[in-house]
């Protein structure tokens, strides 16, 4: 495993559940464990035919093994693994929707012929709000435990699920009225072709309006350009005012067919400094590309785009961990350590976390680059860390009081 510092901005927390932990949780929660979804080696989840639909189905099934309280241990175990791979910062996407009692699984929606214009069964805004509050509270415990034990930093993004469009607005409203200090932004995930960006303009406009006066602004991201073409990327950035895009591999789609359109999109990505959370291992696992040589990441880097690397869904068959993603990318494109460190720096610059944390992370990278100055740099790192901890603790205390958390919760969130 490479020793230099790494960052991942694109990972779905529910998809870090391993089959081993999943089996223990199924037994604890008295749920049937899906043996047919476990790959032969027992360390990965299996889905048939490298199909995105089957992947979403498998994703829904393994999420059903958990209750919301399990997310603390899932968070801690994933961050422990990241620390062992040299990761210094993780921006994880969490999905309150997956913990609602009467949620609709993706294939149920599709098989019922309601993939377009679908209306959720559960439109209870209070349920969505309470689930969001509980989930962020529980995940934050895992984040803070990992921070205390390993020094790894992590923040949350809230997932808006495309095939549950009626739930997106109340979820956004819940986040904006109950801003958790470890929540730094939003992500739009799911089937992008069936549910394009234009369906979610109202939700993103609400976030933009919130950011006009908010002290702690929330970042705007979305999965786009994974399964749909370059036009979808331009449309999503323009309509939703995105700062980052997940995957974005299709941004090179016009390169050989229409140079004018290609250059216009490249200009948009560069001028707005759009962060691109590239996940080649994920794209290959879902049969979008036959291998790293065919993946457009090399060209994205040559174009000078703000590319970072993500592990997406690391416990599914064919997907890779963030350490493996760095290693495979470096080998496939013959990149030196400086080039890989540039990818880490891109991730830090396009992260949604506070400026003080970005500065701390950049100093950690600098400490690796200039080991002779590390002792002096560590003093600055510790000073920034104290300021970050003070701010987070104050905001966690306020969040705890506003949400009437019990004494145990308040004590937990104070431990950094």
Image (cartoon, helix red, strand yellow):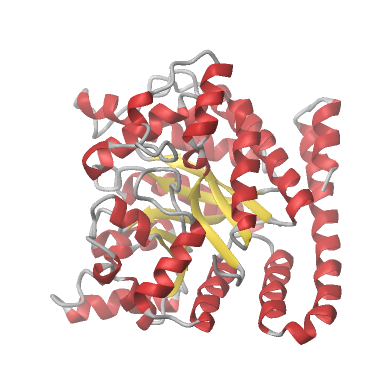
**Quarter of the figure that contains the N terminus:** bottom right
* Near-viewer residue (295 or 317): 317
Question: From the viewer's perspective, is residue 409 above or below residue 272?
Answer: above
Q: Pinpoint residue 34: horizontal percent, then vertical percent.
A: 38, 23
Image spot of residue 126 (x, y percent)? 58, 23
> Number of numbered discs present?
0
User: Furthest-left residue in view?
Assistant: 257
Indicate left or right for 210 with 281 as reference.
right
Q: Residue furthest top?
A: 30
- Report whether residue 216 is seen: yes
Seen from the viewer's position, the closer of residues 335 and 236 is 335
In percent of width and height, residue 346 lies at 53, 73
Residue positioned 36% across, 54% down in the render = 282
Whether 400 is drawn above or below 148: the answer is: above
In the image, is 7 to the left or to the right of 335? right
The x, y position of residue 85, in whole percent, is 59, 59
In the image, 4: left or right of 354? left
**Rendering quarter of residue 127:** top right
- Using the rendered image of the protein, determine whether residue 275 is visible from the camera's viewpoint: no
């Amino acid at each position: 495993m490479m020793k230099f510092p790494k960052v991942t901005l694109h990972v779905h927390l529910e998809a870090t559940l391993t089959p081993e932990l999943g089996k223990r949780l199924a037994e604890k929660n008295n749920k049937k464990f899906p043996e047919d979804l476990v790959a032969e080696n027992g360390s990965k989840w299996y889905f048939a035919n490298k199909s995105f639909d089957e992947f979403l189905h498998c994703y829904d099934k393994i999420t059903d093994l958990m209750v919301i309280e399990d997310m603390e241990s899932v968070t801690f175990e994933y961050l422990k693994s990241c620390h062992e791979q040299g990761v210094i910062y993780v921006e994880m996407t969490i999905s309150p929707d997956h913990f609602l009692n009467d949620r609709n699984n993706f294939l149920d929606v599709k098989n019922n012929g309601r993939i377009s214009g679908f209306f959720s069964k559960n439109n209870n805004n209070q349920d969505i709000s309470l689930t969001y509050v509980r989930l962020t509270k529980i995940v934050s415990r895992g984040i803070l435990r990992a921070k205390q034990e390993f020094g790894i930093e992590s923040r949350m993004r809230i997932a808006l699920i495309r095939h549950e469009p009626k739930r997106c607005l109340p979820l956004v409203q819940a986040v904006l009225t109950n801003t958790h200090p470890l929540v730094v932004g939003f992500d739009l995930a799911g089937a992008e072709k069936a549910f394009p960006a234009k369906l979610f303009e109202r939700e993103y406009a609400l976030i933009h309006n919130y950011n006009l006066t908010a002290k702690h602004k929330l970042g705007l991201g979305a999965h786009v350009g994974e399964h749909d073409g370059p036009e979808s990327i331009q449309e999503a950035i323009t309509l939703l005012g995105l700062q980052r895009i997940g995957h974005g591999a299709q941004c090179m789609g016009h390169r050989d067919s229409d140079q004018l359109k290609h250059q216009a999109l490249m200009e948009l990505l560069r001028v707005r400094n759009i962060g691109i959370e590239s996940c080649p291992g994920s794209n290959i696992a879902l049969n979008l590309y036959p291998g790293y040589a065919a993946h457009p990441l090399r060209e994205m880097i040559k174009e000078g785009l703000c590319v970072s690397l993500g592990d997406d869904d690391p416990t599914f068959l064919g997907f890779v961990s963030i350490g493996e993603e760095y290693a495979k990318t470096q080998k496939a494109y013959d990149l030196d350590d400086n080039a890989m460190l540039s990818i880490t720096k891109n991730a830090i610059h396009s992260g949604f976390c506070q400026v003080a944390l970005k500065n701390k992370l950049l100093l950690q990278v600098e400490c690796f680059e200039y080991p002779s100055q590390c002792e002096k740099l560590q003093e600055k790192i510790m000073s920034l860390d104290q300021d970050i901890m003070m701010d987070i603790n104050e905001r966690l205390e306020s969040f705890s009081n506003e949400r009437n958390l019990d004494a145990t919760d308040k004590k937990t969130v104070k431990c950094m």
